[in-house]
Image: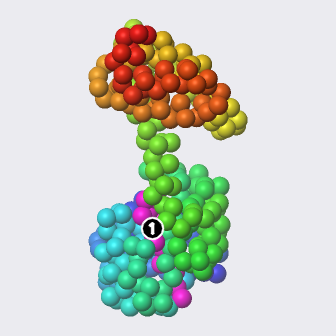
Amino acid sequence: MVALSVIGAGRVGRSLARLAHLSGACRVVDVAGRSEASLAMARDFIGAGRVVADWRALAPVDFYLLAVPDAAIADCARALANTGAAPAGSVVFHASGACEASLLAPLAEQGVLLASLHPAFSFADPERAVAGFAGTLCAVEGDELACARLEELARLLGGRPFRLAPGGKAAYHAGLSVASNYLVALTAMAEGLERQAGVPAELLGDLLGGLMRQTLDNALALGPYQALTGPILRGDAETVASHLAVLPDAAARAAYRAMGWQTLALAGDRLAEPARQRLRALLAGSSSAERES
């Protein structure tokens, strides 16, 4: 049985520690932070652990999870290093999707192994997170030995760990942001255009939802190259020009053009060169190209 302590009483720390406790193969030892009241609530949710407000009292364990906001990771790593509580050979890791294990560098001088583990999962509600976590993909990066051990811990929690390339954390998180946050922004943009066209608000979910789900299913099943359809793939510059003409403001036109460039690149050799050049001129903002269309 491995031993885990959690520093931070937030939703991620509580959820992962609860999963560790429920696994039966991991012992939650300490729940540490600043507020004893918050720590007691976290400990009660986890179902195990000792409340520790003074980090110098942390017990030696196999794993220490710094479940704190991204901006606090480096400071917490320094604070933990100053206590000398984490023994050489233990693994200290954080759960940020954007930050690398290098933020934990002050601990390396003490022989501590450093890594990060990011579950691609929403922890908005810890109860729901614990119930639905099984099978979640977990990105791992950091020291080689720390990663190997952290992968074992991720499996104990019910996750599916995978390695990121060295220095790959920023690209990994950017991809998740495009897939999640930008999808929401694109949905809002599409809804605005449909309202502009006179589509009743109560039909927007059915109109866009069905198409977006089908398109996403095709892109994931067939690959983006094979799933691509639409006016850019057809070389239909007139339709693209008509889209640009009705977009409500400069921000919407910039977003449309940015995604148009990505679509043009994805179309690849399926698009004849004359049509490609015409579309390039439109997407570059050529007023003469737009007038000719």
Q: For mark 1, what is the residue?
A: 100
Residue at far right of view? 222
Kind of residue sitting beneath label 1: Glu
User: Coloured how?
Assistant: rainbow
Out of 155 and 23, give the one closest to the viewer: 155
Can residue 47 be seen in this snapshot?
no
Asked if residue 291 lies left or right of residue 130, the reply is left
Q: Is residue 273 a member of the stretch shown in magenta?
A: no
Looking at the rendering, the stretch of residues picked out in magenta corresponds to: 89-101
Asked if residue 10 lies left or right of residue 213, the reply is left
Out of 231 and 281, give the one closest to the viewer: 281
Residue 274 in the image: x percent, y percent? Answer: 56, 21
Q: Which residue is drawn at 40% across and 80% down?
A: 105
Where residue 148 sits, quadrant-wise, is: bottom right
Image quadrant where one finds the N terminus? bottom right
Out of 105 and 71, give the one closest to the viewer: 105
Where residue 51 sits, quadrant-wise, is: bottom left
